[in-house]
């Protein structure tokens, strides 16, 4: 059994690596920072291959696939990504384009390439890490919310295509709210709502993934927010979303 995890050096990606290694999975771990991957490798119980790579480049995404495509990978977790806070008129365009490349294009490329292999052998799991941000527009994080909406929409659409073909391949999207990681420090934003423990989110996500849940929303608060969001008028939602950030 083998899993490939992107954005594996910190946060959710790191905890996914620990959890899957404890379950007996050999791992391919991908992230930019080699030293963090090497440190993580020393902590894990199973065979681990580390690949230091910036997946913000679509060329590097293709390079990664070519490097590992002959290995019998059972699980792909597309976790790499980052956020950026601030008013759209003020945020840095180059950083936003980098975010689109990593949060959106990398997920698109890797999902497509690995999905073809999984469909051919009629097995495999793809978990795309989206966010509760996927369910509504996000003032003060407009671009980030847009990238996660893309990931969520693409993933659920692919699910339906696979279902109609009676494929045994799983695809789903993990949509947590705030999680206690370095994400907020990087994004330079804080939320006035409770954050979830990263290990809890990973444990919950894997449990639901293996049960083939299509949309995975950890935590009671975010589940309630999801259903409230379906009912609330758009202008009400925008005011609330704006006010929970600072």
Image (cartoon, rainbow, N blue to C red):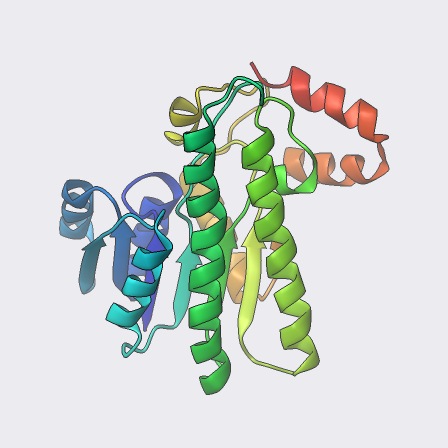
Q: Is residue 20 visible?
A: yes
Q: Farthest residue toward the bottom? A: 121
Quadrant of residue 198 within the rendered picture:
top left
Q: Position of residue 43 (x, y in %)?
A: 17, 49
Nearest the eye: 197 or 126: 126
User: Is residue 161 placed above or below 61 in the rendered structure?
Assistant: below
Q: Is residue 118 left or right of residue 143?
A: left
Q: Is residue 214 visible?
A: no
Residue plotted at (61% across, 37% down):
133
Q: Position of residue 29 (x, y in %)?
A: 26, 56
Residue plotted at (65% across, 83% down):
166
Residue plotted at (28% across, 63% down):
63
Q: Is residue 231 left or right of residue 180?
A: right
Q: Is residue 48 left or right of residue 134?
A: left
Residue plotted at (51% across, 80% down):
119
User: Is residue 71 placed above or below 77 in the rendered structure?
Assistant: below
Q: Position of residue 244 (x, y in %)?
A: 63, 19
Q: Is residue 118 left or right of residue 242?
A: left
């Amino acid at each position: 059994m083998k899993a490939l995890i992107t954005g594996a050096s910190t946060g959710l990606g790191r905890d996914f690596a620990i959890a899957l290694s404890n379950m007996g999975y050999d791992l391919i771990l991908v992230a930019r920072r080699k030293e963090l991957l090497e440190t993580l490798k020393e902590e894990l119980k199973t065979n681990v291959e580390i690949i230091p790579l910036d997946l913000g480049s679509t060329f590097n995404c293709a390079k990664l696939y070519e490097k590992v495509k002959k290995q019998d990978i059972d699980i792909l977790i597309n976790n790499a990504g980052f956020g950026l806070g601030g008013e759209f008129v003020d945020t840095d365009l180059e950083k936003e384009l980098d975010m689109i490349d990593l949060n959106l294009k990398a997920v698109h490329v890797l999902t497509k390439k690995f999905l073809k292999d999984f469909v051919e052998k009629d097995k495999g799991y793809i978990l795309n890490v989206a966010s509760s941000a996927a369910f509504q527009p996000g003032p003060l994080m407009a671009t980030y919310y847009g990238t996660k909406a893309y990931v969520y929409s693409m993933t659920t659409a692919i699910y339906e295509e696979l279902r109609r073909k009676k494929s045994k391949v799983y695809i789903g999207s993990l949509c947590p709210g705030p999680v206690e990681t370095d994400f907020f420090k990087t994004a330079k934003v804080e939320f006035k709502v409770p954050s979830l423990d990263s290990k809890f989110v990973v444990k919950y996500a894997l449990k639901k993934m293996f049960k083939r849940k299509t949309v995975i929303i950890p935590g009671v608060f975010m589940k309630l927010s999801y259903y409230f969001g379906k009912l609330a008028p758009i202008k009400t939602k925008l005011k609330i979303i704006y006010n929970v950030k600072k």
